[in-house]
Image (cartoon, rainbow, N blue to C red):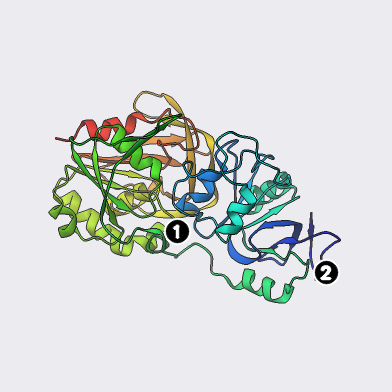
């Protein structure tokens, strides 16, 4: 699977993953030609590769899919969480085949090429996943050279010199540029996306890299949604007259994004604004309340993560995608843990006592994944006046 020093690829190899350690994993390239640097992670979901690749939380990451048949149902214009893929590349076991699905509009490999994203097939993804589990998520370069010729000195240097995700604010890179309304509700076969409500409580969603399905679940719960850029000020948010504020998911180090996000969240808390945060939004809420965040060894990414609700012991199977977490040992007085991971005990939910503010580390909107935690949208929107 790996070699320490070869500059010459084996016969037929047109793709390579070059780790910061100097190790090389060879394969067959597909999608766009070229190279990109990022952090290697793995996702254990059996469905939803298009949603995963377009999730803005995967910015500057290279996704290893543990499920072998990636690309077999093609891609379409509806199963996206953003308008373009945000993961810089993907690693898969089997060669991408001709799609077999009546909803397919394009081959997965052609879609990646059109969006400038790189893929490698023919990789022992189980071995690579085990490596990430045992050694942590490495920095790496993913490369595709259709002629099989690689400048290994340049690629190794790029992998070695990249600083990694820690300390990196990526919300600025993926957020929307302008304030705008959101009108789509959930999708149904043969009907497309339902229209959002014309009436109901007004929610302002701060876009740190929001997935579309989060906004759809907010409208499904009865909210009228306005989406604003990540650096929108407190005064600009309040001028929209929200009944509540949603803090979205997103990529990068929450401690870096906190420089501009936390002061706004603290002002919203001081104004007793109802707040709901997911993933990065949850982490930023924790930071605003006085807790700390930390980089995880390997992160959580998949659609089958068990989370326990501490209030009654109920277990929810959840979708997750994060490499940072709120440190449970740093929760100050007035912040209660509400959910915990049954995989490793990490903190998965908080609520601020005396405030109408809560957040969860996982993704209750799924897409892909189970809908066990969809009640959280009703909890938030249903309590708004």
Q: Nearer the viewer, residue 103 or 5?
A: 103
Label 2: how many Cα within 10 Å (few below 14, some 14–19, many 20+)? few
Identity of the residue drawn at 86% across and 61% down: 11
Residue 343 showing in the rendered view: no
- Against 370, residue 203 (above or below) is below
Q: Is residue 280 left or right of residue 130?
A: left
Mark 1 and mark 2 lie on one chain; the one further toward the N terminus is 2
The residue at which mark 2 appears reads as 8
Q: Is residue 67 left or right of residue 347?
A: right
Identity of the residue drawn at 74% across and 50% down: 123
Residue 97, x across and y down, in percent: 71, 43
Residue 248, x across and y down, in percent: 35, 48
- Against 307, residue 275 (above or below) is below
Q: Quadrant of the C terminus?
A: top left
Q: Nearer the viewer, residue 333 or 123?
A: 123
The quadrant where residue 155 appears: bottom right
Residue 78, x across and y down, in percent: 46, 41
Q: Is residue 75 left or right of residue 329?
A: right
The residue at which mark 1 appears reads as 252
Q: Is residue 43 left or right of residue 182?
A: right
Q: Quadrant of the N terminus?
A: bottom right
Residue 183, x across and y down, in percent: 29, 42
Residue 165 showing in the rendered view: yes
Identity of the residue drawn at 66% across and 74% down: 157
């Amino acid at each position: 699977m790996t070699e320490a020093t070869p500059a010459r690829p084996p016969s037929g190899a047109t793709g390579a993953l070059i780790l910061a350690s100097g190790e090389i994993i060879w394969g067959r390239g597909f999608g766009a030609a070229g190279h990109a640097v990022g952090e290697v992670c793995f996702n254990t979901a059996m469905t939803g590769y298009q949603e995963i690749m377009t999730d803005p939380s995967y910015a500057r990451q290279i996704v290893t899919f543990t499920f072998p048949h990636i690309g077999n149902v093609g891609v379409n214009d509806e199963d996206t969480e953003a308008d373009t893929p945000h993961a810089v590349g993907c690693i898969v076991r089997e060669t991408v085949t001709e799609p077999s699905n009546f909803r397919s509009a394009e081959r997965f490999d052609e879609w990646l090429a059109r969006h400038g994203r790189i893929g490698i097939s023919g990789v022992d993804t189980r071995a690579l996943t085990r490596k990430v589990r045992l050694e942590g998520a490495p920095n790496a370069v993913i490369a595709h050279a259709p002629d099989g010729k690689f400048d290994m000195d340049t690629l190794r240097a790029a992998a070695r010199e990249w600083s990694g995700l820690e300390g990196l604010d990526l919300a600025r890179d993926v957020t929307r540029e302008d304030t705008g309304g959101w009108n789509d509700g959930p999708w149904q076969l043969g009907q497309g996306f339902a229209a959002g409500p014309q009436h109901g409580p007004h929610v302002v969603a701060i876009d740190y890299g929001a997935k579309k399905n989060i906004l759809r679940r907010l409208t499904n719960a009865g909210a009228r949604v306005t989406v604003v850029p990540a650096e929108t000020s407190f005064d600009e948010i309040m001028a929209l007259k929200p009944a509540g504020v949603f803090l979205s998911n997103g990529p990068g180090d929450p401690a870096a994004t906190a420089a501009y996000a936390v002061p706004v969240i603290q002002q919203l808390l001081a104004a007793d604004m109802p707040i709901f945060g997911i993933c990065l939004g949850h982490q930023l809420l924790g930071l605003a309340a006085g807790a700390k965040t930390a980089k995880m060894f390997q992160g959580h990414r998949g659609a089958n993560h068990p989370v326990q609700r501490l209030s009654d012991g109920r277990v929810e199977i959840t979708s997750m995608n994060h490499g940072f977490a709120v440190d449970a040992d740093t929760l100050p007085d007035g912040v209660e843990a509400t959910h915990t991971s049954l995989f490793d005990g990490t903190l998965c939910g908080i609520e601020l006592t005396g405030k109408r503010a809560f957040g969860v580390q996982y993704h209750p909107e799924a897409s892909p994944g189970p809908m066990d935690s969809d009640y959280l949208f009703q909890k938030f929107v249903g309590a708004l006046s």
